[in-house]
Amino acid sequence: MSDPDLTAVEAALQSQRIETPSWAYGNSGTRFKVFAQPGVPRTPEEKLDDAARVHEHTGVAPSVALHIPWDKVDDYGALAAHAKDRGLRLGTINANVFQDDDYKLGSVTHPDAAVRRKALDHLLECVDIMDATGSRDLKLWFADGTNYPGQDDIRARQDRLAESLTAVYDRLGEGQRMLLEYKFFEPAFYTTDVPDWGTAYAHCLRLGPKAQVVVDTGHHAPGTNIEFIVALLLREGKLGGFDFNSRFYADDDLMVGSADPFQLFRIMYEVVRGGALEEDAGIAFMLDQCHNIEPKIPAIIRSVMNVQEATAKALLVDRETLAVAQRSGDVLGANAVLMDAYNTDVRPLLARIRQERGLGPDPVAAYHRSGWAEKITGERKGGRQAGWGA
Ligand code: PSV
Ligand code: MN
Ligand code: MN
């Protein structure tokens, strides 16, 4: 067995960046009930104020994803300046073509050209916003699909989708990308127009290098081997990023690493194995979660830490020994190498790295000590729901 190069492991963990989503700071719930929490942000600016606390205590969450129109403001340049003043920057722009009555039968795949035009105009407006915020990525998730066999023409819907994607792709500027997200069902129950990585990949391949697939860890059928998808997309140069969250049943949007930390480790191992952790690999590591019953800011801090822990374990895999075991057909030996890394307690290592950067060793405890929760509970009345204004 060879000892891991701890300096390289530490350097990789120091440079890792995890983006948090603006909507995770707002009130959320299920279709049965949204439980309001005290101190929740009332404006996009206040969401950034909370995100700054996550970055302050973790040191690795300097960017915030926006969802349009949930984060609609008159002046996106001013919002970017608000972020900058707090040591943050605005990240991925998430388009929203699913919360309008017109989209009952779809958005970019709708049978009516006028509805498709409306959806496309929103996507193009999102690229305008990216120009103002300096964002690199446009994230596209379509709720489009059908509920009943025969309801619409499956192939024609793919043609309509391709047409809109091409129009958006052609509008992208230098250094901007389009990330296409898939999800196997919901809200549509019979067909979904982008249900899986294969469909997303096929569209992205036709579009060109600025179009990449995004893997939301909650968007697969139970039992799907997500790390295989990650390995394959990386091999093809078509993985653009992650929406991290956990699920037990469907698209539960629970804290990443809470339901199945071993799966998260296996995914991060493929990321490390694929050389995709480094910033120049261009993979966006983002959270996409809702904190319906737990306090939001500490939950987001916890989630960032969960990604860090899975990454640290993935970095500790003794790849030389693993390769020897794999080449010699040593099934048990190879598996043991992976399990040894997974079973390592990396919390002391991460605590030390934080302390070296002048941070508290336990970011959740540091947040609780900071008094921020008491401050926002006292000052903010009438916090808003994550999806207001849409
Ligand atoms: C859809 O389920 C999704 O994962 C997409 O990323 C949306 O934009 C996001 O959730 C937020 O609701
Ligand atoms: Mn998502
Ligand atoms: Mn989702």
Image (cartoon, grey):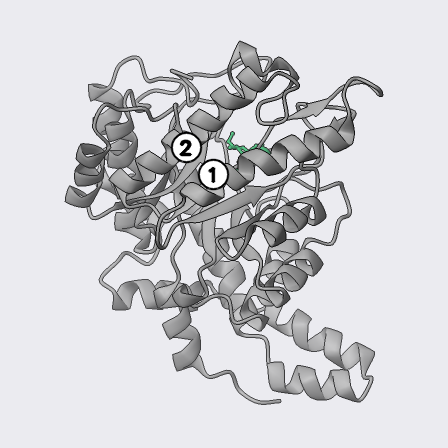
Residue identified by numbered label 1: 168
Is the C-beta separation of discs 1 and 2 under 8 Å? yes
Position above or below: 344 against 184: below
Which amino acid is tagged 2?
Leu
Name which quarter of the figure residue 115 lies in.
top right
Position above or below: 109 against 2: above
Position of the C terminus, as image quadrant, is: top left
**Front-lying residue, 116 or 341:** 116
Hey, which residue is sitting farthest top in the picture?
A: 101
- Count numbered badges in the picture: 2
Give the mark nearer the N terminus: 1 vs 2: 2
**Front-lying residue, 4 or 118:** 118
Residue 35 in the image, given as x and y percentages of width and height: 47, 16
Instruction: Tell me what residue is drawn at x 33 percent, y 58 percent.
Output: 361
Residue identified by numbered label 2: 124
Q: Residues within 10 Å of mark 1 (few under 14, many from 20)?
A: many
Residue 225 in the image, given as x and y percentages of width and height: 73, 54
Q: Does residue 66 appear anywhere in the picture?
A: no
Residue 203 in the image, given as x and y percentages of width and height: 63, 46
